[in-house]
Image: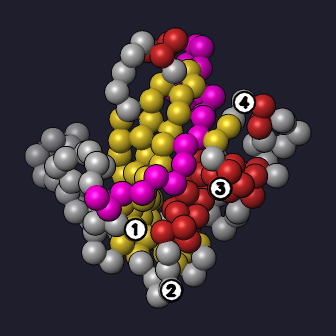
């Protein structure tokens, strides 16, 4: 049900979030993911881990709660690479829990593409959105004059992308 709109489903929207490395990238905040996924599990033969990152305030509150985010590339959708993020809050605050997985970004497969190249543009789009970088900009000043790397840690490629955006 949609408030003020009866029981009608919202029409899918397809808006490019960013153009990175000569390819369009879509983000769940600007587009509807094209296939309906019934099973949120990413356990399949065509999923590749691209890394993990620690986010010190994955859930804002008093206190903020940190957690880890694992990122996987899914290749089962014809013509697309899809980035899944699996978030898990620190157990000290939320107790034992399962990792929650969801699709966050996707991009068409391009000529001479690779999983590594697609991973870069998908993760970069995720981090640009996460840091609230406005359209047309590629950097944030939110972390200016901060040693943000003291609280954040992660796989080298993911940390390199965050440095591109934050430094």
Mark 4: give few (<14), some (14-19) or many (20+) Cα within 10 Å. few
Q: Distance between the Cα atoms at labels 3 and 4? A: 17 Å
Label tally? 4
Q: Distance between the Cα atoms at labels 1 and 2? A: 14 Å
Residue pointed to by mark 4: 151
Q: Do the residues labelled 4 and 2 touch (CB within 8 Å)?
A: no
Q: Which of marks 1 and 4 is nearer the N terminus?
A: 1
Residue pointed to by mark 1: 81
Residue pointed to by mark 3: 157
In this rendering, does residue 4 appear at all?
Answer: no
Task: Please provide percent x and percent y for residue 131.
Answer: 64, 47
Report the residue at 82% width, 52% height from top.
167
Residue pointed to by mark 2: 112
Q: Give the range drawn in magenta.
A: 45-64
Which element carries disc 1, helix, strand or loop?
Answer: strand
Q: Based on the displayed image, in which of its 4 quarters is residue 164 positioned?
A: bottom right
């Amino acid at each position: 049900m949609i408030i003020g709109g009866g029981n009608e489903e919202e029409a899918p929207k397809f808006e490019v979030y960013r153009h990175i490395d000569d390819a369009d990238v879509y983000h769940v905040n600007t587009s509807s993911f094209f296939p309906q996924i019934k099973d949120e599990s990413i356990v399949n033969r065509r999923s590749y881990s691209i890394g993990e990152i620690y986010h010190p305030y994955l859930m804002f509150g008093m206190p903020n709660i940190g957690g880890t985010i694992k990122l996987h590339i899914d290749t089962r959708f014809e013509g697309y690479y899809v980035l899944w993020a699996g978030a898990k809050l620190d157990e000290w605050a939320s107790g034992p829990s399962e990792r929650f997985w969801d699709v966050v970004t996707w991009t068409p497969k391009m000529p001479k593409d690779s999983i590594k190249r697609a991973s870069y543009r998908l993760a970069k789009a995720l981090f640009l959105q996460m840091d609230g970088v406005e359209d047309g900009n590629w950097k944030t000043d939110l972390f200016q004059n901060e040693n943000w790397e003291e609280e954040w840690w992660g796989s080298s490629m993911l940390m390199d992308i965050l440095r591109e955006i934050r430094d």
